[in-house]
Amino acid sequence: MGFWKKQHTLRGNFLEECLNESNRIYQEKGLAVVQKIPTPITPVKLGKDKGVITLAYFDQQSTVDYIGNVQGIPVCFDAKETKLDYLPLTNVKEHQIKFMQDFSEQDGLAFLIISFLKYEKIFLFPFEDLLKYWEGAKNGARKSIPYEACKQEYEIKRNGNILIHYLEAIQAYLNNK
């Protein structure tokens, strides 16, 4: 059973806030409906000020961070952030791989959105590429996704008031598929 402590609450928070705002704008403009999936937790300890949760345990394994529909295409993705030159595969859980694989087999589009803080760049990383690294790691290959593995045409950039305009990266991916 996993535990959550208050000091870890801000990891990846900025990336998710930007994605949530981008998704709000997408929905407002009729471009996509994508929502953040909350991780189910049970509070164990509340802080004295305003009942803030300071200790909780996870009720069950979550699937991915986001799920929705982009102009008729079902999508699911997880947002990952790293300060390193690579994303450790320990940041991706086996149940997430299984969910994305099942989602893909139902003709959905599954991917990671990876933020490389060191380079100030964000990429869409397709599930089939993730799966190659995942399977490779299980067979003794590297246990991370290097920055260089991210395709430049899948870089996600800001576009006007859309902070993380990943729809362009989805289109580039679909064009290459």
Image (cartoon, rainbow, N blue to C red):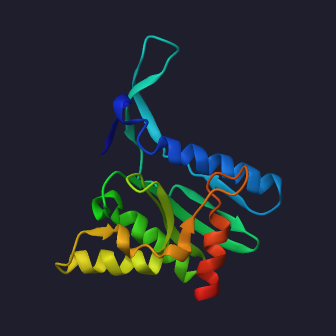
Give coordinates of residue 109: x percent, y percent: 58, 75
Numbered marks: total: 0
Q: In the figure, 43 relative to 13: above or below?
A: above
Residue 108 visible to the viewer: yes
Q: Quadrant of the N terminus?
A: top left
Give coordinates of residue 85: x percent, y percent: 31, 61
* Residue 119 in which image quadrant: bottom left
Q: Is residue 75 left or right of residue 58?
A: right
Residue lying farthest to the front in this orientation: 119
* Residue 95 in which image quadrant: bottom left
Q: Is residue 34 left or right of residue 139?
A: right
Q: In the figure, 35 relative to 110: above or below?
A: above
Residue lying farthest to the right in this orientation: 29
Residue at 57 percent of width and 51 percent of height: 37
Q: Quadrant of the C terminus?
A: bottom right
Residue 38 visible to the viewer: no
Residue at 22 percent of width and 76 percent of height: 138
Give coordinates of residue 23: x percent, y percent: 68, 53
* Residue 55 in which image quadrant: top left
Residue lying farthest to the left in this orientation: 140
Give coordinates of residue 68: x percent, y percent: 66, 62
Residue at 53 percent of width and 64 percent of height: 77
Residue lying farthest to the bottom in this orientation: 177
Nearest the viewer among 33 and 3 is 33
Q: Is residue 129 left or right of residue 104?
A: left
